[in-house]
Image: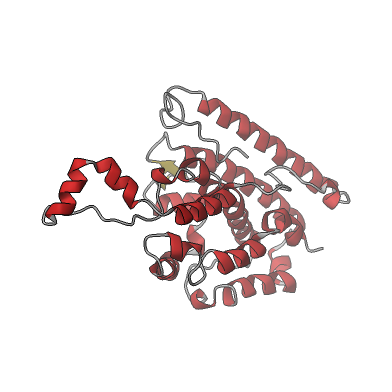
Amino acid sequence: MHPVFKLLDPHMRYTLDINALARQKLINADGIIESCFTPGRYCMEISCGAYKNGWSFDMEGLPADLMRRGMAVPDPTQPNGVKLLIEDYPYATDGLLIWSAIENWVRTYVNHYYRHASLICNDKELQAWYSESINVGHADLRHQRCWPTLNNSEDLVSILTTLIWTVSAQHAAINFGQYPYGGYVPNRPPLMRRLIPFPEDEAEYANFLADPQKYFLNALPSVLQATKYMSIVDILSTHSSDEEYLGERRHSSIWSGDADITEAFCSFSAEIRRIEKEIERRNLDPSLRNRCGAGVLPYELLAP
């Protein structure tokens, strides 16, 4: 079994299946998104436009993403090379701990199996996998400059860290918090069936002013639309029954023949447990107003 496959397997196990299911049920023509969201059939055009004009693999790592979004600036004195512009930013502060842990684990792993750059350049299976990811998986973007080279260990560490971060911590931050907020449709309705009226529309505007709450409730999605939306948000927010969390391995014997890597993974697991304790401590710190206090939920989306 190829060492990169062994590293990525628990993170990528269901990725293709989930994406195929999403194309069949979620983002297909007349699917759930088109029928239950305000933009309707334009949803996919918006998504495709965002992908073609804004998606860039080299910006998907957390430090680069924070700088791209104006939430951090370069700072070589910091552990991750970035300084946050908002210190009480739970996603970033927790995420940078996890990013560092993943990166250190991946670097140890890569340097063990690829002690020289020539081993990476001459690994035909590895190079074919990366080439297919770009030229087939992203054929319409294959000529863009966002793709790192794959010529040495640092290239491979960067690519693998970005992949693992995206399908683990980043996925958790985006998906697993949806239902607690969006599951109650009036909190975040996917569509509104009536627009807020202008004063020029005197009768409609008068109804709005007379009872804004009733007007709002009448504008909400239908029961069928709301139920569909609640169901899909629940599915997107639910952990798999056989979920493997960061620092865990369901089949620990996968590296039983390699004591150095087994020890390195144990160190990674210990670091992940330390991060989880640190997140718990932060969530109890009253000085961190974005994660602790009256009416503020603790930020647990990145608890490993």
- Percent across and percent down for residue 4 are 73, 60
- Percent across and percent down for residue 220 are 36, 51
Closer to us: 173 or 22 = 22
Closer to us: 295 or 11 = 295
Is 47 on the left-hand or right-hand side of 6? left
Q: Residue at x 79, y 48 (%)?
A: 261
Q: Tell me, yes or no, if residue 123 can be seen here.
A: no
- Percent across and percent down for residue 46 are 39, 67
Res 75 quadrant in image: top left
Give the quarter of the figure containing the C terminus.
top right
Q: Tell me, yes or no, if residue 211 can be seen here.
A: yes
Give the quarter of the figure containing the N terminus.
bottom right
Label total for image = 0
Above or below, 124 against 241 in this view is below
- Percent across and percent down for residue 214 are 29, 43
Q: How is the image coloured?
A: secondary structure
Closer to us: 296 or 266 = 296
Above or below, 292 against 222 in this view is above
